[in-house]
Image (cartoon, grey):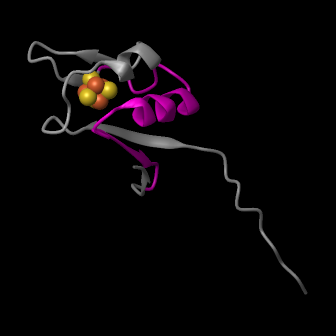
Amino acid sequence: MDDQKPESKPLKIGKIVVDRDLCIGAASCIAVAPGVFELDGENKAVVYNDHGADDETILLAAKSCPTQAILIFDEEGNQIFP
Ligand code: SF4
């Protein structure tokens, strides 16, 4: 029997990490998801609320980062992006 499971699992973000060595303070992540990211005193993005936007918006924010400094993991710890 053909037992095909659909691949389109709903996105579930477990963890957001900003690589401070890659972040150049461009702030596009903050423009996309101001409820999640902010700049600290060193002009590096930090996550102050990882539930401050829906998962699609957080992923968009990560994709908007020019240096791909935002790493996204799912709830099992698998890297989703980049
Ligand atoms: S978009 Fe990337 S480089 Fe810009 S502040 Fe956010 S993490 Fe840093």
Q: Is residue 12 left or right of residue 64?
A: right
Q: How many marks?
A: 0
Point out residue 66 in the picture as x, y percentages from the top left corner. 32, 33
Query: Does the magenta segment cover residue 62?
Result: yes
Residue in the picture at 27% in, 38% down: 69
Does the magenta-highlighted stretch encompass residue 77?
no
Q: Residue furthest right?
A: 1
Q: Position of residue 5 (x, y in %)?
A: 77, 68
Above or below, 82 against 6 in this view is: above
Question: Residue 48 or 56: which is nearer the viewer?
Answer: 56
Going by the picture, which residue comes out furthest to the front?
66
Along the viewing direction, whichever of 51 and 28 lies nearer the viewer? 28
Residue at 41% x, 14% y is 31
Residue at position x 39%, y 20% in the image: 36
Task: Determine if residue 23 is in view.
Answer: yes
Side of 27 where 51 appears, left or right = right
Vertical placement of 70 versus 26: above or below?
below
Q: What is the magenta range? A: 48-76
Residue in view at x 91 percent, y 87 percent: 1
Give above or below for 11 relative to 9: above
- Residue 68's spot in the image, x, y percent? 32, 40
Spot the residue most to the bottom: 1
Q: Is residue 33 visible from the viewing direction of this image? A: no
Query: Which quarter of the frame holds ligand 1?
Result: top left
Q: Horizontal and vertical percent for residue 39?
A: 22, 15
State left or right for residue 19 relative to residue 16: left
